[in-house]
Image (cartoon, rainbow, N blue to C red):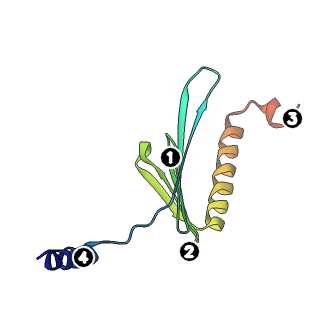
Amino acid sequence: MWKTTFIWFLFLFLTLTQSVKAGWVITEQSNDSFGNKTFNTLFIQDSIIRTDKPTSISMINFNQNRITLIFAQYRSYWQGTTEELRKTTVHMTEEQMTKLLAYAPEQKKTGD
């Protein structure tokens, strides 16, 4: 009887088990000069890195060469390659500088 039970248990165990993949979880706590605590968490598994910060989530998938940035507060996200991220960042910086210069006083625009 125990052999039959053991065989059934072994059969169910082998058929119902799923592969489990382990990764790394690194949590960092930082304090600002006012004593406020901030927690950042880094998840690493296979070839994917995910960073959770209070204001955003960043994911880098090295297999697909993709970066995903999620801003939950604004309900928005961006996804692309490193080159697309560089181009987007440069373009946004140029737009911000143009807007700032438009509101600057004339004597500040010339550098006097």
Q: Is residue 41 visible?
A: yes
Residue that appears at 66% across and 62% down: 87
* Residue annotated with mark 1: 56
What residue type is disc 1 on?
Ser
What's the distance in space between the residues labelled 2 and 1, CA to CA? 22 Å
Q: Quadrant of the C terminus?
A: top right
Q: Disc 3 on helix, strand or loop?
A: loop
**Mark toward the viewer: 2 or 1:** 2
From mark 4 to mark 3, how far is it between C-alphas?
80 Å
In this rendering, is residue 19 above or below 69? below
User: Which sits earlier in the primary sequence, circle 3 or circle 2?
Assistant: 2
Report which residue position mark 2 lands on: 63
112 or 86: which is nearer to us?
86
Q: Nearer the viewer, mark 4 or mark 2?
A: 4
Rounded to the nearest angstrom, the CA distance separating label 3 from label 2 is 47 Å
Residue where numbered disc 3 is placed: 111
Q: Residue at x 62, y 61 (%)?
A: 85
Question: Which residue is disc 4 drawn over?
Answer: 10
* Percent position of residue 2, x then y: 15, 74
Q: Nearer the viewer, mark 3 or mark 1?
A: 1
Of marks 2 and 1, which one's residue comes earlier in the chain? 1
Q: Earlier in the sequence, mark 3 or mark 1?
A: 1
Query: Where does residue 68 sit, x and y in percent of width and height?
Result: 51, 60
Along the horizontal axis of the image, is 50 left or right of 7?
right
Which class describes the residues within 10 Å of circle 1: few (<14), some (14-19), or many (20+)? some
